[in-house]
């Protein structure tokens, strides 16, 4: 009776309490015991219902662009994930952010808080098909990693909005190679909600603007290749994408990720390239569009190119300890306006020491430093700035059931 009551309480907790299928250090869900197994001594008989709570919190001291320091406690992540295999072929996955708005978006009728709600079917070991709200199939290892484990995204990686309704087809001709075709909505919201009513686009050399029109087919098409070589010691995640933003305005992406995966050391290097006919990330638009047009309404830059180079190292230098070092270099350029070419550069640097106190649980305690510096072309008129943050906290991927 006590065991039954305890299990009921645990299940209720899990349902009111993120994670991508990541492949990094400490992320293999199968090696960790659920709370039901740990406390009640139960033995799971199937893989139909798995519940995870992803929670991260820290005490922070940070300085802003004005070099003013402040301190606070922050709840960084709180996501509920439920997934399982209903049969040998049919599976599902649900992931929801509990600290984000639950208002449904206009295009897909899902809240932004819902990352994933999909159903998949495996026709064979080589082919599967998925539908619902899911992650867009971009390449790169920063993008693939569980967001809870990322202290600071690169600017491009952190600005991308990538949880969309659509379909995914994956073909694995051999166990080490996978090819993915992903077709989704371009946005969760309708066109007017994204870009605003009566929005304008800066055209050509910046001397004139024109009204933005909604696209006939606001869809994103992504082709992805995931490779494994040398007994999984070398991995690749590459993708090409085309996304409809407005009438005759497209965003093109090239993501190239490669990773060295050794027993006690993992290192990846990502390139992310955004070639936007219309500035969907909005970084350049937010900083300079009103000043170059004199228009105070909704105005967006055209022909914006973002480059992002990201590298990250994990080194398990002692049992239950991990050292993480990460850096990124990013540029923004408005390619058809001469004085806006390569007008902005961003440098990010992150370091942390992590300790895993309990081998049967995916719990890590950490001390981390996060820094970012942004500079502009000389004489451009915007001031460079940098920010800093020191964190002491924990991350816990709780396997509730």
Image: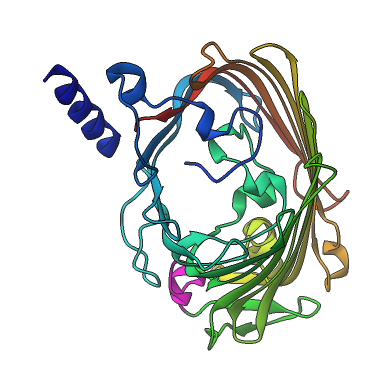
Residue 259 rendering spot, x and y as whole percentages: 80, 42
| Magenta run includes residue 194 | yes
Give 142 or 73, whichever is nearer the viewer: 142
Image coordinates for residue 388, horizontal then vertical, percent: 67, 26
**Residue 396 point in image, percent of width and height:** 47, 25
Where on the picture, by quarter, is residue 79? top left
Q: In this view, does 186 lie to the left or right of 290?
A: left
Can residue 295 be seen here? The reply is no
Residue at the (64%, 77%) spot, across then down? 201
Q: Position of residue 360 (x, y in %)?
A: 49, 18
Residue at point 61%, 78% (across, down): 244
Q: Which residue is more in the foreground, 171 or 140?
A: 171
291 left or right of 111?
right
Who's the residue at 64% across and 20% down the image? 368
User: Which region is colored magenta?
Assistant: 188-197
Quadrant showing the C terminus: top left
Classify 22 as above or below 295: above
Please identify the residue farthest to the left as the structure is shown: 1
Return the residue nearer the eye: 97 or 75.
Answer: 97
């Amino acid at each position: 009776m006590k065991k039954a009551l305890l299990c009921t309480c645990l299940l209720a907790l899990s349902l009111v309490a993120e994670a991508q299928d990541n492949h990094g250090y400490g992320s293999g869900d199968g090696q960790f015991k659920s709370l039901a197994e740990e406390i009640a001594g139960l033995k799971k008989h199937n893989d139909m219902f798995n519940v995870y709570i992803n929670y991260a919190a820290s005490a922070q001291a940070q300085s802003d662009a004005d070099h003013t320091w402040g301190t606070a406690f922050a709840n960084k992540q709180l996501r509920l994930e439920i997934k399982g295999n209903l049969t040998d072929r049919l599976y599902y996955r649900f992931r929801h952010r509990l600290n984000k708005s639950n208002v449904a978006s206009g295009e897909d009728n899902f809240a932004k808080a819902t990352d994933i709600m999909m159903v998949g079917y495996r026709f064979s070991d080589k082919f599967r098909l998925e539908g619902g709200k899911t992650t867009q199939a971009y390449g790169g290892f920063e993008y693939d990693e569980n967001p809870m484990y990322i202290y600071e995204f690169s600017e491009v990686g952190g600005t991308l909005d990538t949880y969309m309704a659509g379909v995914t087809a994956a073909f694995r001709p051999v166990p080490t190679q996978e090819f993915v075709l992903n077709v989704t909505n371009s946005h969760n919201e309708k066109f007017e909600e994204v870009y605003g009513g009566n929005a304008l686009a800066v055209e050509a050399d910046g001397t004139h603007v024109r009204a933005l029109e909604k696209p006939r087919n606001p869809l994103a098409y992504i082709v992805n290749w995931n490779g494994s070589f040398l007994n999984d010691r070398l991995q690749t995640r590459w993708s090409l994408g085309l996304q409809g933003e407005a009438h005759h305005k497209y965003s093109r992406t090239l993501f190239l990720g490669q990773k060295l995966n050794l027993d006690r050391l993992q290192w990846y290097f990502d390139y992310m390239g955004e070639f936007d006919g219309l500035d969907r990330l909005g970084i350049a638009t937010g900083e300079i569009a009103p000043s170059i047009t004199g228009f105070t309404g909704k105005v967006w830059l055209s022909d914006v190119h973002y480059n992002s180079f990201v590298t990250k190292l994990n080194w398990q230098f002692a049992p239950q300890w991990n050292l993480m070092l990460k850096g990124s270099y990013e540029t923004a350029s408005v390619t058809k306006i001469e004085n806006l070419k390569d007008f902005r550069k961003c440098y990010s640097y992150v370091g942390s020491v992590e300790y895993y106190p309990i081998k049967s649980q995916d719990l890590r305690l950490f001390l981390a430093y996060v820094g970012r510096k942004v500079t502009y072309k000389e004489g451009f008129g915007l001031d460079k700035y940098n920010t800093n943050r020191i964190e002491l906290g924990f991350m816990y991927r709780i396997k509730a059931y």
